[in-house]
Image: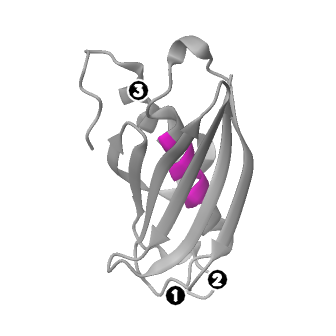
Amino acid sequence: MAGRGTAQGDPHDAVPALFAATPYLSTIGYVVERYEPDDVVIRLPFREQLTNDGRTYHGGVVATMLDTAGALAAWSNHDFETGLRAATVSLAVQYLAASDRTDLLCHGTTLRRARELIFTEVRATDPSGRAVAHALQTYRIA
């Protein structure tokens, strides 16, 4: 995982570990593959326990991954002087295809930053690049 690397102790670099340590997300088992300003990739290694039928991820798991990648993108270039309270305001998900016993990759990018709202786009694919889901997220940090 790459970080900003601009200063020792940069709070941006602590965000991925803080997310992964939350009670719910710690049970999912995702890995941060890229964490750059406004550009994040997370991977969910395939786990049968997170599926509907032993093959296909539950839609809620896919939505969790989309939401998490978007939130990480929002935090990845946040000005910590402007606030630390955060929440997803809106998450619109389009499921495009089922995952089939494969890892899930979610690529989150920031589209726009306003005073408190950050708009992100997230694409979920399998490792071959086949689209699984797409999301637009509005995230608030105040």
Total marks shown come to: 3
Q: Residues within 10 Å of mark 1 (few under 14, many from 20)?
A: some
Image position, residue 88 (x, y; %):
70, 43
Label number found at residue 12: 3
Image position, residue 61 (x, y; %):
61, 66
Name the residue rendered at 52%, 17% in the picture.
80
Per the model, the C-alpha gap separating discs 2 and 3 is: 35 Å
In-front residue for pair 51/130: 130
**Front label number (2 vs 3):** 3
Q: Quadrant of residue 13?
A: top left
Relative height, residue 27 to residue 99 (above, below)? above
Residue at label 2? 52
Relative height, residue 104 to residue 97 (above, below)? above
In-front residue for pair 83/20: 83
Asked if residue 72 is among those painted magenta in the image, a careful observer would answer yes
Question: In the displayed structure, does residue 103 sit left or right of residue 2?
Answer: right
Question: In the displayed structure, does residue 132 sit left or right of residue 114?
Answer: left
Question: In the displayed structure, does residue 69 sit left or right of residue 23?
Answer: left
